[in-house]
Amino acid sequence: MLADIEEFYRLDRLPHIWCPGCGNGIVLACLVKAIKELKYDQDKTVVVSGIGCSSRASAYLDFNTLHTTHGRALAFATGIKLAKPELNIFVITGDGDSSAIGGNHLIHAARRNIDLNVVIFNNNIYGMTGGQYSPLTPKVQKATTAPYGTIERPFDLAKLVEAAGATYVARSTAYHTRLTTELIINGAKNKGFSVTEVISQCPVSYGRRNRFNTPAAMLEWQREMAVPVIKARSMAPEELEGKIITGELYRGHAPEYVSEYTKLTQRLKEEAEGV
Amino acid sequence: MSGPTKPRLMQGNEACAEGALAAGVRFFAGYPITPSTEIAEILAERLPLLGGKFIQMEDEIASMAAVIGASLAGVKAITATSGPGFSLKQENIGFAAMAEVPCVVVNVQRTGPSTGVPTAAGQGDVLQARWGTHGDHPVIALCPSCVRETFELTVTAVNLSEKYRVPVILLMDEVIAHMREKVELPSPGEIKVIDRKKPRTPPEKFVPYQPDADGVPPMANFGEGYRYHVTGLIHDKMGFPTNKGPEIAGLVTRLTGKIEQNAADIIRWEGLYLEDAEVVVVAYGCVARSAREAVKKLRREGLNVGLFRPVTLWPFPAAEIAKRASRARGLVVAELNLGQLKLEVERASQGKTGVHFVGRIDGELLTPREIIAQVKGVL
């Protein structure tokens, strides 16, 4: 455990449930470092998660924590944020949780541009149930429910949430820890819907079926595949095939939902008072 | 409550919205569905004026989730739907039952199953209200049979959800929802509003799921200094997941037990001419109106017939039914389904008398004449 961020963990909840070599702990530490850097009051910070391996993270953190139903974290978080706008809200979700069962909530939270900070732990697989393919499993990769390799096309989540209206979209990997922390911080500072997708590794349910012999080999792969967004802009689409474009991918400006609601109530109040 | 206290013509759905506001509800999340939509429309207009929050979510599941989120943040929250939406909400109703998050779900019943007949009345969700979500779980379901009672029971629903930290279902029906009646609402001072128990210990000593003697733990709202964990997993008293047998059984037993233990406080029913009734008609919601008319007519004919109207369908007033069953020649259950509450009446009457049935499933309300015919068959 890293001494400088221990205060944000419920140490009595450890050891965690994750497998050896799992990337979740690395990504979680990046998130915690970001919250520390942001100097958010623990009492005023809420961590909401869905269902799946990464979503179990909320129980390990010393904030107001809410472990919801599968795919619904953003809908619960929307209720909290609208009810109590002063709370800082982070949403932890996985690839299946956010893009399959929770896909509708993801695009609508993005459309509203509600001030939530989402960190998607993308390990390309349903890990908790033992390795079924998700909407983010790359084509031809194997899973227990795709024993011959998946024939489905994966989402590009970053493009999806950008198109849906998110005003901050970033991507990193578990290998690039400093970048991950920096991106989460910037996302939190964005007043609006912020999504940071972090490519993580699942050596047990994904790696060993897909020619990754060790967790380290998966981290190596993340390092090799990562292309900073600035560099990617000068590369041809075929060169970028299979690559992980990292960094701040999109920043937009749009009205934030809760602020708009507050403005509406303010206007109504003024009208009632005859201002 | 800013509504007028002088008599006014009001629809059931409107009374529900007014009742929610009177009970202190300041958050609504919902999704449009007939025949409940007016509740959302009215609250969309009223809540922003009262500093409350209204949001139309992307689907029924999300509305239930948002309501739970708002309640965890300390704001009384409600949603309204009908059968198809009620089915979708079951997942998170179970979460609210498990995590003990106060909230109210209004289900304006229409004819089912599936999309059914959206504009026609039905009472086919009686058992779904009890067992719609998976696993053993607590629930309270209240069923109004006139517009004024819709107002009162909405207040009661919010109060019971806060008091027992349980999702409360307000089981309306299309007739009551869309019917207009002259209503005199109670003045704000007459309305009893109950708020959830707050922790009595400092945060460092707070045990989030340690119940009081009533089986209900005090509740801390997010953002008020009590950092704790909320999960739909079976959890220990600290709120963290557990796989230990005694803790699993202990939690489920307490969750269901808190309703059983407080049944006397929760259960509501109404009787008419029960003292000497040889036949008791059991009816609720819109059908109770026809049943009342039927019973009055039969009394005028000199027949000893009474009406038992359960107001809480869940928990069911089984002891009261048992009492009538041991004295009456027969019970006649009248409802707009194929006999859902009849099952419960049979169970409660323990074979002490015959349980007869009259129902309709064609989207039309049972008439007094139909009920009278069935009662006369028993007499």
Image (cartoon, helix red, strand yellow):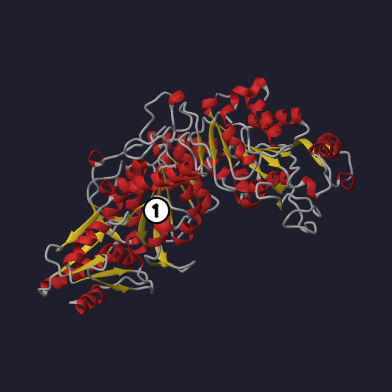
Q: Element type at marker 1?
A: strand
Classify residue B340 by image quadrant: bottom left
Classify residue B174 by image quadrant: bottom left
Label 1 Cα neighbours within 10 Å, binned few <14 / some 14-19 / many ≥20: many
The N terminus of chain B - image quarter: top left
| Left or right: A76, with B184 as reference point | right
Above-or-below relation of A242 to B90? above
**Residue A136 seen in the current view:** yes
| Left or right: B219, with A124 as reference point | left
* Residue at the spot 42% in from the left edge and 39% down from the top edge: B52
* Residue at the spot 15% in from the left edge and 63% down from the top edge: B274
Above-or-below relation of B198 to A72? above
Q: Nearer the viewer, residue A274 or A102?
A: A102
**Residue B166 seen in the current view:** no
Residue B54's spot in the image, x, y percent? 46, 44
Q: Nearer the viewer, residue A118 or B164?
A: B164
Give amino acid for label 1: Val
Q: Nearer the viewer, residue B325 or B274?
A: B325
Residue B122's spot in the image, x, y percent? 38, 66
Q: Chain of mark 1?
A: B
The C terminus of chain B - image quarter: bottom left
Classify residue B163 by image quadrant: top left
Residue located farthest toward the left when viewing the structure as drawn? B302
Q: Mark 1 highlights which residue?
A: B106
Q: Nearer the viewer, residue A13 or A179?
A: A13
| Left or right: B271, with A7 as reference point | left
